[in-house]
Structure formats: structure tokens, C-alpha cells
Amino acid sequence: MALVARVRALLLPGSRLRGATLGRAANGGGAGARRALSHRVLVEADPAAGVAVVKFRNPPVNSLSLEMLTELGICLEKLENDKTVRGIVLTADRPGIFSAGLDLTEMCGRNPAHYAEFWKAVQELWLRLYQSNMALGAAINGTCPAGGCLLSLTCDYRILADNPKYTIGLNETQLGIFAPFWFKDTMVNTIGHRATERALQLGLLFTPAEALQVGLVDQVVPEDQVQSTALSVMSQWLAIPDHARQLTKTMMRKATVDQLLKHREADIQNFVSFISRDSIQKVLQVYLQKLRKKNH
Ligand SMILES: CC/C=C\C/C=C\CCC/C=C/CC(=O)SCCNC(=O)CCNC(=O)[C@H](O)C(C)(C)COP(=O)(O)OP(=O)(O)OC[C@H]1O[C@@H](n2cnc3c(N)ncnc32)[C@H](O)[C@@H]1OP(=O)(O)O
């Protein structure tokens, strides 16, 4: 289903996204700050600063399900069309887990049409974020594996909470799957080829100190200062004239974006045929069961 159709489905009577509003904040935020609510994404906009904080709230682990991808896409599209917003900070509504990455239940026990729809939504969100004209910051206030790490890598800078429990990285190989070429390219563009090769083959999850050292994040700060630091760094990015910053960003990212645009359909087919393999279904199911067993 294309984004428009998925949005329609989400807006059907009964959906909690229906009637989402952008109103004056009941509390918090500066003068004129606005708050928008959807089911899984909370937006706190500060038009005076030109910045919106987009908070993930998809319990229990902020996984990127099809619905979450869709709501995030809608929210970003709205912000892109809002002339008062020039920068966005992505963060988790509750500290602890920034995002557990792609929702594994979307990749297990479904049919090929579902896998194709899901993968298309992953591609769409990446394209929207990686090509965004806005300045994007990640305030990483929790653990950040795989797809969560990818989200943060689409941003222009990353601030990570100084908590050794919070790790970040593309750990796909540890699950028995692998990071597609555009995940890999996004990481190469951030930390370079050799560090990416090592990180991807070993499926490394970096502690804050390691992430800072390898350049996966730009700053590690005390946990209670992640958002305020991300906002203060944002003011540096917004001090640059938009057109100059945007042209530079496009120049830096265009080759990577073009690769996916050129191979988009093939990438979907590759994903569907890989994820549908019995052997891959089995490893994903074992991984999910291990996660679930912990709690039962
Ligand atoms: C085109 C190319 C062709 C081929 C490419 C090949 C492959 C495609 C690549 C696909 C890319 C995938 C990227 C991903 O993002 S895969 C997801 C990777 N994520 C993880 O490994 C994280 C897994 N989760 C955890 O490690 C922990 O949950 C976490 C540390 C985040 C939190 O721990 P905590 O103890 O707080 O919570 P849990 O008890 O573990 O979890 C609570 C419940 O949430 C469920 N859960 C956790 N993570 C996920 C997830 N990613 N998706 C779905 N559900 C998840 C977990 O099972 C618990 O459920 P219940 O027990 O409550 O039922």
C-alpha cells in the first residue's frame, strides 16, 4: 500500500490518529509552543525557535512497525510543510529505549505482499529523512539497535545519553540477517568504510564511549541533558542560511540517495525473497522467542 493509502487506513473511523491536532501546549515548551498528538508520535513545536521535537511513543520498545513508520512519515511531511519549522529533533518520549529497530513481527510469518509493503515503508521513511531539507538532530535517550540506529544516522548530528546500558549500532548479523546496502552506505557516510565493515560484519553494538570514539555519535552527555544539548546544537545548525546548508547536505548525500532510488524495486524484491526463506524465518522466530521468553 502506498503512503497515501496507508494514511487513509489510519484515518478511518476508530483510528486514534483521526482528529490529531496541533494546538497550544498545555504545559512545557516556550511561549507559543505547540503540541501535536497522534497515537505513536508526539510533536512539540516551538515556532519561535523554528524547531520541533518529535517523540516516539510506541510501547513497549518503540519498534518501527508499519503503523509507526506511517505515522512518523505523516508527521514529518506535516512538519516539512510548516514554514515555521526549520529543524527537528528526534527522541523517545520515555528514556530507556530510543527505538528497538524494525518491528520483527512485521518480518515473521507474514506473506510476500506484506513484506513488500513493509519494506517500501522503510525505504520511504529513510528517503524522507535522509533527503530532508530541515536540520535533523537525534537526542538518543535510550538503547538504539539496528533500525533505531539507522534513524539516528539519517540525522545531521547525534547526541547520546551517557549510560553504558544504552548501546547503538547495526547489529543485524547477530540476528542472522544483514544490513542492506543503503543502511551500510548511511553508516559509511558517518564513520567511514573500515569502521563500518568491522561494525557490520560483527554486528557491533557500541557503548556510548565506543560510539563517540568511532564517530557514530557527536557528543555523549549526562542523561538529563540529552534533549537540551540537542536543542542547543540545533541553534548552531540553524544559524547557517538554510539554502547554503541544504545545498551542502544534498551534495553530500545525493549519490547515496540516488543508489536507492535507482534500485528501489529490486531492493524490495531482494528483501522479500530473502526474508521469505524458511531458514531466515526460523532464525528470526528463534530470536523473537528468546526476547519473549525473558519476560515469561
Ligand atoms: C534488500 C536487502 C535484502 C535483504 C536484506 C536482509 C535483511 C533485511 C534487513 C532487515 C533489517 C532489520 C533491521 C532491524 O531493525 S531488525 C530489529 C533489530 N532489533 C533488535 O535486535 C533489538 C531487539 N530488542 C532488544 O534487544 C530488547 O528488546 C531491547 C534492548 C530493545 C529492550 O529490552 P527490554 O528488556 O527493555 O525489553 P524486552 O523485554 O526485550 O522487550 C519487550 C517486548 O518487546 C518485544 N520486542 C523487542 N524488540 C522488538 C522488535 N525489534 N520488534 C518487535 N518486538 C520487539 C519483545 O519481544 C518483548 O515482547 P513481549 O515479551 O512483551 O511479548
Image (cartoon, grey):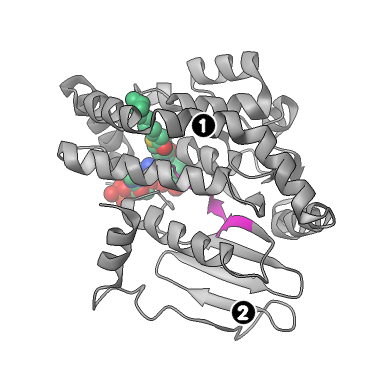
Q: Is there CB contact under 8 Å for labels 2 and 1?
A: no
Instruction: Reply above or below: 191 against 45.
Output: above
Instruction: Reply above or below: 201 against 122.
Output: above
Q: The disc labelled 1 sits on which kind of residue?
A: Asp
The answer to whether residue 120 shows anywhere in this view is yes
Front in this rendered view, residue 187 or 162: 187
Q: Which residue is drawn at 42% across and 46% down?
A: 124
Instruction: Reply above or below: 29 against 286.
Output: below
Q: The disc labelled 2 sits on which kind of residue?
A: Arg
- Name the image quarter holding residue 117: top left
- Name the image quarter holding residue 155: top right
Q: Count of labels shown?
A: 2
Task: Where is residue 35? Give x, y as percent.
Answer: 57, 77
- Mark 1, secondary structure of its residue: helix
Q: Magenta stretch containing residue 96, yes or no? A: yes
Label 1 packing within 10 angstroms: few (<14), some (14-19), many (20+)? few
Q: Name the residue under label 1.
A: 258
Label 2 packing within 10 angstroms: few (<14), some (14-19), many (20+)? many
Instruction: Reply above or below: 27 against 144.
Output: below
- Which mark is first along the chain, 1 or 2? 2
- Mark 2, secondary structure of its residue: strand
Q: Magenta stretch containing residue 253, yes or no? A: no
Q: Residue 130's mark?
A: none
Q: Residue at x 42, y 51 (%)?
A: 61
Q: Which residue is drawn at 55% across and 69% down?
A: 43
Query: Relative to residue 32, is residue 6 drawn left or right?
Result: left
Q: Within 8 Å: ligand 1 and the Cβ of disc 2?
A: no
Q: Name the residue under label 2.
A: 34
Magenta stretch bounds: 89-101
Q: Foreground mark, 2 or 1?
A: 1
